[in-house]
Amino acid sequence: MHAAFEVGVLVEILKDAEQGRLDLVGLSGTSAGALNALVAWYGLAPKNGSPGSKTEAASALVDFWEGFVASTSTSRLINFLTYGAFRAQETEILGISPSGLSLNPFGVLSKLATAFLPVAGVRQQYFDLDYLLNQTCPRFDSIDWKRVTTQLLVGASEVVNGFETVFDSNVNKGTRPEEVRYWRQRLPLTLSGVAASGTLPIFRKAQQIKGSYYWDGLYSQNPPVREFITKADVDEVPDEIWIVRINPQQWPELPETMADIVDRQNELMGNLSLHKELDFILSVNDWHKKYEEFGKYHKPVTVRSITMHEATANKLRYSSKFDRSAELMRELRAEGQEVARGWLARWKKGEVGCYPSDAAYRPIAER
């Protein structure tokens, strides 16, 4: 649910792209970020009988999230109970916190619960990710790949062999998928691949794709970035990469409660995997300056961060990621739009910073 902030940011970026103030050449996402990236990209993608547009993409994002939240009486009750259970697990008395109960997604009880939800009047797109994606992108098979100009990257983790996986729309356009190299693989973009990116193993069985099994991409690429800069034609490499940050880079203090420790562990997993890719880009930029021959075949890429307000980041918790209330979604989306409007206005004037310093809320403490 924290990714609702991204929706507000993306809507404003799409508005500026529509007005020609920037050229949006690619989108990338992992987990909930993959859902946002897919919906925006699908709205941009030309399909048989529809050219796609920035306006369509922005509208689709808003509609998707309005449908994603708990909107019926039954889904609001389920949200109250499930979010309440997560909140209860964050309660700590004398250093002891309840472990809570979780259903094994492979187990009988989980299957019975899923079968009961439609009977209780819960919309299928509320609990069935594959169904949700097919409803959101009903004409995915009619995409005119030759005319697609915006690249989409989606990150996932192959479970059995441990492959870092990216589903890349450029493969659908005819670029040959790479053979597995260094425990990495690059595959065609599919709705199943996006579902894989959002598969948390405590809630959902691993996504099966052609005999392989996938979990959330948080563990490997959060989100994929490298494929934007490793292109044969240097002219296709973007000038800038903007990271819409959901998990804060910094914390106000040392986490000491179990709830804070779990929250910070989740944030670190995502941020540290992202920084490995961003730091590689900074190294390439350094090599571009240092080695003349290297500079002929590569270009420097500026990386920038767009972050939510520090007070908001400090207020959110691991449990609130599972609060599918319309109120939280709209609050975060509105903040995303506010932040993006200000950031884009400063960017046009050359007044925004760049990575790594702009990822921080406060100066790094002396050590």
Image: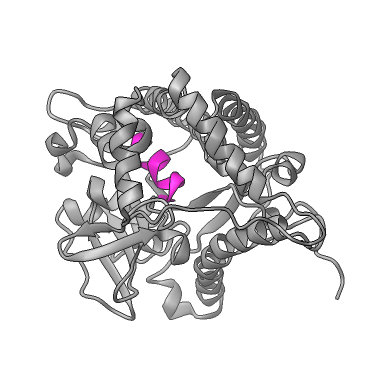
Nearer to me, 167 or 261: 261
Q: Answer whether residue 257 is magenta in the image.
A: no
- Please state, as top left, top right, bottom left or bottom right, where the C terminus lies in the image: bottom right
**Residue at left offset 64%, top offset 32%:** 345
Residue 44 shows in the view: no
Q: Which residues are magenta?
A: 29-39
Nearer to me, 238 or 275: 275
Lateral position of residue 184 relative to residue 314, left or right: left
Residue 257 shows in the view: yes
In the image, residue 186 lies at what x, y percent?
Answer: 26, 65
Magenta: main secondary structure equals: helix
In the image, residue 264 lies at what x, y percent?
Answer: 66, 60
The quarter of the displayed image where residue 313 is located: top right
The quarter of the displayed image where residue 303 is located: bottom right
**In the rendered image of this protein, does residue 181 appear above or below residue 127?**
below
**Residue at left offset 31%, top offset 61%:** 214
